[in-house]
Image (cartoon, rainbow, N blue to C red):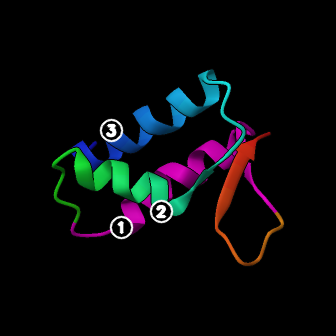
């Protein structure tokens, strides 16, 4: 796992354990960037996001104007 992937995992796990109602792709990508991780392929971060979706822990909202995720 890369530093960026680990930060994405931490971010999503913190969201799941929190009382927050949702997070956006922008918030996730900003957290990864602010961690100092150098991401050369953002599909690796999307892969982490997809894993959490496939595990039934989060899901994408129906809002087509924002890429937003909520707890499943």
Is residue 2 visible in the rendered image? The answer is: no
Question: Secondary structure under badge 1?
Answer: loop
* Above or below 38: residue 43: below
Q: Residue at x 21, y 69 (%)?
A: 40
Residue position marked by numbered label 3 in the rendering: 6
Q: Disc number at residue 42?
A: 1
Q: Is residue 8 found inside the magenta-colored segment of the image? A: no
Give the position of the N terminus as an image quadrant: top left
Start and end of the magenta stretch? 40-61
The residue located at (66%, 33%) in the rendering is: 20
Return the x and y of residue 45 as percentages of the image width and height. Answer: 41, 57
Q: What percent of the width, then of the height, locates residue 71?
A: 74, 38
Cα–Cα span, label 2 and label 1: 12 Å
The disc, 2 or 1, on the residue closer to the chain's N-terminal end is: 2
Q: Position of residue 31 (x, y in %)?
A: 35, 48
The residue under label 2 is 26
- Asked if one can make out residue 30 in the rendered structure from this viewpoint, the answer is yes
Q: Earlier in the sequence, mark 1 or mark 3?
A: 3
In which quadrant will I find the C terminus?
top right
How many other residues sit within 10 Å of disc 3, few (<14), some (14-19) or many (≥20)?
some
In the drawing, does residue 36 fall left or right of residue 48? Answer: left
Residue for point 68% across, 52% down: 69
Secondary structure under tag 2 reads: helix
* Circle 1 crowding by C-alpha within 10 Å: few under 14, some 14–19, many from 20: few
Q: Is residue 30 left or right of residue 48?
A: left
Apparent side of residue 18 relative to residue 63 in the rendered image (left or right): left
Q: Are marks 2 and 1 in contact (CB under 8 Å)?
A: no
Residue 12 in the figure: left or right of residue 33: right
Q: Residue at x 35, y 67 (%)?
A: 42
- Which mark is first along the chain, 3 or 2? 3
Of the two numbered discs 2 and 1 in the rendering, the one whose residue sits closer to the viewer: 2
Residue 17, image x, y percentages: 61, 21
């Amino acid at each position: 796992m890369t530093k960026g992937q680990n930060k994405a995992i931490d971010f999503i796990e913190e969201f799941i354990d929190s009382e927050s109602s949702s997070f956006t792709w922008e918030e996730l990508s900003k957290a990864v960037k602010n961690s100092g991780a150098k991401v050369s392929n953002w599909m690796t971060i999307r892969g982490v996001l997809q894993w959490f979706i496939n595990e039934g822990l989060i899901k994408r909202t129906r809002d087509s104007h924002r890429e937003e995720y909520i707890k499943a």
